[in-house]
Image (cartoon, rainbow, N blue to C red):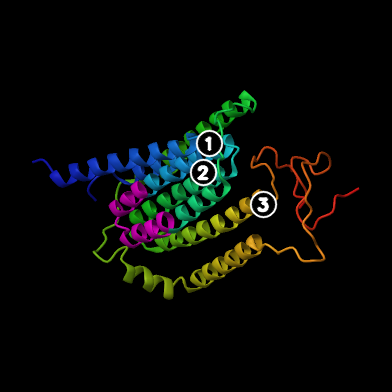
Amino acid sequence: MDGPDVTWYLAVAGALFAIGTLGVLVRRNPLIVLLSIEIMLNGGNLALIALSRLQGNGDGQIFALAVMAVAASEVVVGLGLIVAMARRRLVLDVDRLSTLRG
Amino acid sequence: MVDVGNILVWIVWFVAAFACLGSGIAVVTFSNPFYAALALIGNLGSLAVLYLLLSAEFLAAGHLLIYAGAVVIVFLFVIAYLGDQTETPWGAGGPRWQSLGAIAAATALLLEIIMVIGLAAGDRLQDEAQIDGSFGSPAALGRLFLTKHLLAFEITSIVVLAAAVGGVVLGYHARPTAQQPVRESGPVEGVWGNREAPPAGLEEPS
């Protein structure tokens, strides 16, 4: 294969996952937390596709497609929750959301 | 003999990888969620380039369609609906140790991932398998999906259906009826916590 070998792709995937973790831990706006979770999922996807290329086997790409479907579902439910919170005039700050009481 | 193709692929990889990491950091650090969502588009685009370099053509196209075409648009709609949500990142308003601890945790995680890749996989990552031109094509993936991974395909459809139902349930907004008039009340202190007023149809608990 021309270009960098799979190790380099895995390093980028790990760095993406760490960046996403940082966003989830640091940010207090639930919208940005969701965006950071997307970055983490994409890091995982990149690792799956790189290893699928290493093995020459399509199974990893199938797994990545399933992860994409789960990510889209998660965004729908997460954004629905955020809109429901905003409609109830809750402050959009994950540090201040300490109860599940509706 | 200089291998021009190899050098070109390296250049494309460097540009895509650094654009990917840079826009990822931008998503995490921008204070305005609108700009963060726009930076996510850059992240997704450069990731699609990396997928193409790994000869996953169908996944690159599907990635752009699903994420940049659908997910980010929904994000932008919600951000527009919610209005100004600008937040100062990196701890203003929150304790300083929280940010420092989060940075330390993320760095530790990154080092751990790199160590595990280096130790467990090591030199086994160098020799890629030989692939033919159909690897990663829609036909090959579709054949896998409908033969070997049919169960995963069906389960995925159930997951998406459940998410659609959940989105409708969460977004459903019952119109106030004559029996349940909208309460017009100002900010309420007390058991409702940080909420300004109880929602329509709910009584203040005593």
The x and y percentages for residue B92 are: 59, 26
Q: Residue shown at 76%/66% (left/top)? A: B177
Q: Chain of mark 1?
A: A
The x and y percentages for residue B43 are: 39, 45
Q: Is residue A30 above or below residue A54?
A: above
Disc 1 to disc 2, how far (Cα)?
Answer: 8 Å
The x and y percentages for residue B153 are: 49, 70
Q: Please name the residue that numbered disc 2 is placed on.
A: A36
Disc 3 to disc 1, how far (Cα)?
Answer: 28 Å
Mark 3 vs mark 2: same chain?
yes
Which disc number belongs to residue A22?
Answer: 1
- Give the tally of numbered discs: 3
In front of the other: label 3 or label 2? 3
**CB under 8 Å between discs 1 and 2:** yes
Sequence-first disc among 1 and 2? 1
Q: Please name the residue that numbered disc 3 is placed on.
A: A87
In front of the other: label 3 or label 1? 3
> Few, some or many C-alpha atoms within 10 Å of disc 1 (few <14, some 14-19, many ≥20)?
many
Magenta residues, as a range? Answer: B45-69
The x and y percentages for residue B33 are: 51, 41
Which disc number belongs to residue B169?
Answer: none
| Amino acid type at mark 2 | Ser
Label 3 sits on a secondary structure element that is helix
Taking the image as shown, residue B51 lies to the left or right of residue B191, namely left
- Outermost residue, left direction? B1
**CB under 8 Å between discs 3 and 2:** no
Label 2 sits on a secondary structure element that is helix
Mark 3 vs mark 1: same chain?
yes
Where residue B26 sits, quadrant-wise, is top left
